[in-house]
Image (cartoon, rainbow, N blue to C red):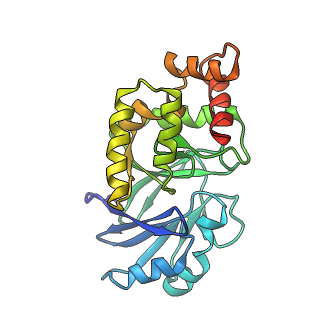
Amino acid sequence: MSSPQTPIITPLPCFIDNYMWHIATPEGDWVVDPGDANVVLAHQRTREKPLIGILITHHHLDHTAGIAALVEAFAMPVYGPNEVREGISHYVTSSQRWQLAGLGNVDIIDVAAHTRGHIAFYLADHGQLLCGDSLFSAGCGRLFEGTPADLARVMATISTLPSTTMIYPTHEYTAANIRFAQAVEPNNAALADYAEQVAQWRAADRPSLPTTLARELAINPFLRSHEASVVEAASAHAQRSLQSGEQTLATLRAWKDNF
């Protein structure tokens, strides 16, 4: 079930700052983390093709509340992790590869840190990562259930993907994340340029997402915990010498939580 045509992925805003991602393919449409069924249904009325599937990254209600109403409307499969107790027709686990209509080869990636069962869907034929709340532009998800060691593993895993990977986080947190990132790396020129671009986008009421892995490797402190500038900033904040990696990430996450 190859998928030569790259899916068209569009944000559907809901609640205060959530994005549900709508995926248009020649074989039909998909939606990622539908917290609000009404928004999806309204969008789908403008579409010629039906919804043919749902992808769920983790159990939080703002990512799952719309499942039941959408399945009632379209009678379609729902793929998601074991931590989601209701509404999943096909449970997926890390290291699996699924072939899904219109999406082609979809790799399931373990990104458990924000929650213990969080997964990401990597559309391997197209270089697109549907990462839920595991990674944001210039930031990452809070550790509600995981540990700094989990976060270190997740950041390392994401870093190994091709730098051209398009990344689709599910919250519009970019501007706030940039303010923190600039506190960590005030002399990061790429970050300064990105801050200007994001400010222009948001002033025009445009999404700051998706992003790219190449960009995030240059500006996201949580993907840069091995960089001397980030380790030094975290050490200064902690008032002790830190090692790169887990120690630095733990300090960055605690710092950001109270920023």
Q: Residue at x 37, y 49 (%)?
A: 199
Q: Is residue 173 above or below residue 32?
A: above
Is residue 125 among the parts visible in the rendering?
A: no
Image location (x, y in percent) of residue 37: 53, 78
Taking the image as shown, residue 124 lies to the left or right of residue 53, namely: left
Image location (x, y in percent) of residue 253: 64, 36
Of the 4 image quadrants, the one containing the C terminus is top right
**9 vs 88, nearest the viewer:** 9
Q: Residue at x 69, y 22 (%)?
A: 238
Taking the image as shown, residue 251 lies to the left or right of residue 100, namely: right
Residue 113 quadrant: top right
Image location (x, y in percent) of residue 2: 32, 58
**29 vs 14, nearest the viewer:** 14
Q: How many marks?
A: 0
Q: Residue at x 42, y 37 (%)?
A: 216
Of the 4 image quadrants, the one containing the N terminus is bottom left
Taking the image as shown, residue 84 lies to the left or right of residue 2, namely: right
Image location (x, y in percent) of residue 214: 36, 35
Is residue 171 among the parts visible in the rendering?
A: yes
**53 vs 180, nearest the viewer:** 180
